[in-house]
Image: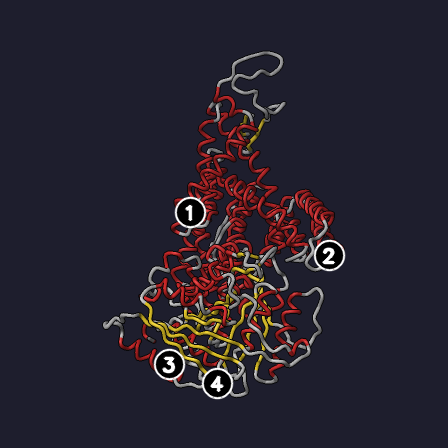
Amino acid sequence: MASNTSSNGEILVCVEFPPKVNSIGILGTDGVREHEVKADQVMSYSLPRLELEIVLIFVLSQVCHLLLKRAKTPIFVSHMIAGLIVGFVMHEIIPEGDKNKMSSSESNAIVMGSMAAFGYSLYMFINGVKMNVSMIKKAGTTSISIGILPVLIPMLILPIFKIKNNKELTSSTMFVATTYSLTSFPVIADLLRHLKIINSELGRLALSGALVGDLLSLFFFTASALLRMWKDMTDVSQVLINHIIIISLFIVVVVLVLRPVMYWIVRNTPEGRPVKEIYVYFVMLTFLGTTFLTSKFGQFLLFGPFVLGLIVPSGPPLGYALEKKLDAMVSGLFLPLFVASATMRVVSFSKLPSSKTDIDNLPINELIVLAMLVSKFVVTMGISLYSNMPKHDALALSFIMSSKGIMDLGWYSFLSDKKLIQQKLYNLMVFTIMGIATLVPILVRIFYDSKRKYAGYRKRNIMSSTLNSELSIVACIHVPNNVTAIINLLDVSSPTRDSPISVNVLQLVKLSAQSSPIFITHQLEQHAPSKHSYSENVIFSFKQFECKHNGNVTLSAFTAISPDDMMDEDICTLALDKRASFIILPFHRRWYKNGSIESDDHAMMELNWSVFERAPCSVGILVDRGHIRRPTSIIGTTTRSTQNILMIFFGGADDREALTFAKRMAQDHMVKLTVLCIHATQRDANSASWERMLDFEVMKNVKNSLNVKYIEEEVNDGHITASLLRGMVNDYQLIIIGRRFGIDCPQTYGLKEWSEFSELGTIGDLLASTDFYSSICSVLIIQQQILSENMR
């Protein structure tokens, strides 16, 4: 392929036919004549060149990310850097003359770009599927303002730049201003997910604003493309007929025909069952059709696939099936190729001739970019402060809403392809996006820490709640088996009229096939249990528990749909909002009756660790072995059985908290509480006297209580403690202990080395280990609220 420049400045490209695709190899033959081929000439063929580029992109991306991830830089930036490096490498090694090197390199970028563009359209379709458009109905005034005003107001700055007698610059300026004032939902969602604050209060506000802004941005970008076509055509009616009417018809068909079909597919798929493959293929075929129509009528590549994705119901079964089939391929293969191919053009097209106007006006375009970013930042900041948001949070939100990423890269690639912006300006935009994508995550981390609001400045624990006051509890449910175990535990917690409990049930559901986490507050009308809805059955079971206690229990039910590694945000936020004193979490491992492991959820274990570290109140993990019994009035009888509960006391804040909860249980005459106090044979005379005084105070009423059996033992190492407990566990249905994480004492010496579940503490790990699999007792491990230094 060769290229030349015509007298009017247009670039003429000559393509060689037949195209050189498959290399015959270094020692190969073309079947007609044998000849030698130099190794570097292999790169003149498009297929080996494409394969080399893909390998280089993936290797360099991972190497760059390995070096940059300590700075928490998104992998998107690594893809951009890899593209720049590969573009430079391929530009240098392609074996052609100086004149043809540029054209061959250009062809190289176009081949890669064609493959990447298809992946980009898939990316936009998947993001449309993940977007929950119904969020707009729930968006408040602040979210709508943050979505609309930072898009509109920056455009008003353009009249300040009085550009006269320069049509080319004016056109470029219009598109630069438009794109830099736009808001991209996928970019902001990816950033929030990278920062792990997508389900924080700030993250939800940013997502709501981004959704409003993204739909407005789509309108502006489509309108800009139409205006450009109108400028290029002499017959205005042709634009109206060929573009505006056709776009309108496309939207009507998608909304009125395809959307009902999508919902029909969902209705005809039984709950909990996967959608039929034929339906998935139908949606994919429709996607290919919309991609073709979008290109056919000159619209931005995202328009058709993105609009189609918006009408696909997010979540299971259809949205989940599409995400499962496409997401890994798109994010793992096509997305890196698209980002890299877009940045390769910076090098590949860098020697294309540029007009003198383009070079002279580059500083003005740089100024416009800066003005757009600053105005967007200031507008967002002003709205946030007007809404009484803390200054640090307002700064973080302003940086988030000003972020740029893959969507913006796609916009500028489209503008460059359509010759709406010149190459020098495209290069500037690419490096600006790279700089913003690198700096914004760092700045957001500086100004916003979601853990800060959970800091223990107020005492919210069981000890601070008197026996004759309401105890507020957050009970977390992962799977149906958790329901019975937690209801049984709450039942033996002895809710009475004088000592009621408030239960906030939180069902935790993994986010799939949508970008936006959802938090649902359920209405607690009385419904019969459903054969299909797991959520309704959970609520029904707890509602029956509330009715059985007739005013001694108040119930609220919630569902949090969010990523596994961010569910701790939902749990802690609910505990903070409800002023809870205690969070109950299920243990991540479950056993069959014979002691073999039923399931082992690593994500749940990580979640429990996170809640322990940041909870605004006390936390308990319930290791359920199915033997906590409760009154069985739910199935028609009021027979009650005695509960034998053991509380193991070593001393310290966690043990005091656990003992206080055990005392609450002992108020019920059907609960037989035993307190086992284990002392070291040789006590440390230098141990903290204040801690001893607190232990003595909480134990004072236990030793002389008629409702509590008190046992005191002295041991000198952990092996004796383990033997002592092994001989007692089968006499109890529930054991309550303090977590005592990281605390060493003679009574547990030697046990820590064998720890399997370190999040449970030394004794909690011992009781949950396989050595005790034959025991019938469940275990509740409690950690007292971690207070800030000035509250201790």
As helix, strand or loop, the secondary structure at mark 3 comes to helix
Camera-nearest label, 3 or 4:
3
Callout 3–callout 2 Cβ contact below 8 Å: no
Callout 2–callout 4 Cβ contact below 8 Å: no
Camera-nearest label, 3 or 1:
3
First in residue order: circle 2 vs circle 4: 2
As helix, strand or loop, the secondary structure at mark 1 comes to helix
Q: Quadrant of residue 15?
A: top right
The quadrant the C terminus occupies is bottom left
Q: Please state which of residues 244 and 217 is positioned toward the viewer in this rendering.
A: 217
- Residue 116 in percent (x, y) is at 57, 40
Q: Amino acid at mark 3?
A: Val
Q: Amino acid at mark 1?
A: Pro
Q: Which residue is mark 4?
A: 469
Q: Amino acid at mark 4?
A: Ser
Q: Counting other residues with Cα less than 10 Å from the Cα at mark 1, is it few (<14), some (14-19), or many (20 or more)?
A: few
As helix, strand or loop, the secondary structure at mark 2 comes to loop
As helix, strand or loop, the secondary structure at mark 4 comes to loop
Residue at 72% x, 55% y is 262
Q: CA distance from mark 3 to mark 1?
A: 73 Å
Callout 1–callout 4 Cβ contact below 8 Å: no
Q: CA distance from mark 3 to mark 4?
A: 18 Å
Q: Quadrant of residue 2?
A: top right
Q: Is residue 652 visible?
A: no
> Where residue 698 is drawn, which disc sits there?
3
Residue at 59% x, 38% y is 115
